[in-house]
Amino acid sequence: MTDHVLVEADGGSRGNPGPAGYGAVVKDAATGEVLAERKAYVGIATNNVAEYSGLIAGLAAAAELGASTVDVRMDSKLVVEQMSGRWKVKHPSMQPLNAEAKELASRFSRVRYEWIPRAENSHADGLANEAMDAGKQAEAPKTVKQDRVSPVGWTGATGTPTKLLLVRHGQTAMSVEKRYSGRGDVPLTEHGKQQAAAAAKRLGAMEGLVVDGEAAPIIASPLIRTQQTAQAIADALGGRVETHPGLIETDFGDWEGLTFKEAMDRDPEFQTSWLSDTSIAAPGGESFDGVHRRVRKARDELIAKYGGRTLVLVSHVTPIKALLRMGLDAGPSLLFRLHLDLASLSIVEFYPDGNASVRLVNDISHLS
């Protein structure tokens, strides 16, 4: 464990907004030894979004290393001044990123921010450019194993989209009893396994999920109920299951395992506030805004890795709603107005130019 570290972070956008990426490097403050590097393509975004994303990645890496004191060095005057509290965060798109960075910073005993010239931030800048290059390559037209370009018609979207087949896991004992089921790791019931098998059969018959003998990537939340559902799909397609922590369900904290009524009886005023404000976290848990940021980051990472392909994502109610919300460019009220059944299928496509298309929502025809 290194107590005192330097975090150098940067981000860039080729177009502002345009294809964007970030880079972050964590160094031992005493020796200058590189302890961690982070980089990722973030899709179509502004320079400021990319720079904040780099800071967040650097702080998260420092926390993973067990640091208690952090010196942040960036060539973004905006981010340094806002995080130091000398400038207000006025733009709505910056406010959640600033809040996320401050939450991460609060985990350390001290964080100090320093502006440096770009020439002194070449390591992080290089990582950011590598991320943008990788994103550009992922968005480039594919050859042998390319999915067919979806017709875009009047939408004006261009390029080959990344198609996400969103599958909710099958039934569990918690879902039968309508209890808050977030991070609790509960398996499928026998009926849930039958639902997973039906979803797998549905996907197994879909065109384009197996190309030249290779199955589409199948990525699931790390919890057992999604793993079991994803494995049924993998068996049907002849593929394998990957996991991504960004697809995990909301952390409901102290409400985990309670029914809605039990949570309401315990704290009716707080429960009512939580239902009307997505920035409020469940006691000891996670806010829906936090989930949205986490899922957006997961989506961007998956597009950077698999851009232009069809992916099967096996997840939970809130992450799937978040992805559909991104596709619709809708507000947070969608979370409370959209119903998703167990083992349902939804489809959303994200295009390289920033457009998106929601093609299917909550289809359960395979369960009938």
Image (cartoon, rainbow, N blue to C red):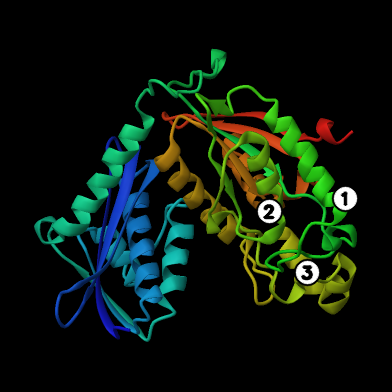
> What is the number of the mark on residue 226?
2
Tell me which residue sits at (75%, 65%) in the image. 186
Look at mark 1 in the image and give the residue it sits on: 191
Disc 3 marks which amino acid?
A: Gln
Query: Pointer 3 and pointer 2: residues touching (CB < 8 Å)?
Result: no
Query: Pointer 1 and pointer 3: residues touching (CB < 8 Å)?
Result: no
In terms of depth relative to the viewer, which is nearer, 209 or 56? Answer: 209
Q: Can residue 343 be spotted in the picture?
A: no
Q: Which type of secondary structure does the marked residue at label 1 adopt?
A: helix
Q: Is residue 4 above or below residue 161?
A: below
Which label lies toward us, 1 or 3? 1
Residue 63 coordinates in the image, percent (x, y): 39, 75
> What is the number of the mark on residue 134?
none
Of the numbered discs 2 and 1, the one sitting upstream in the chain is 1
Q: Quadrant of residue 61?
A: bottom left
Look at mark 3 in the image and give the residue it sits on: 271
Left/right of residue 67 with respect to residue 273 in the rendered view? left
Disc 2 marks which amino acid?
A: Thr
Which label lies toward us, 3 or 2? 2
Q: CA distance from mark 1 to mark 3?
A: 31 Å
Of the numbered discs 1 and 3, the one sitting upstream in the chain is 1
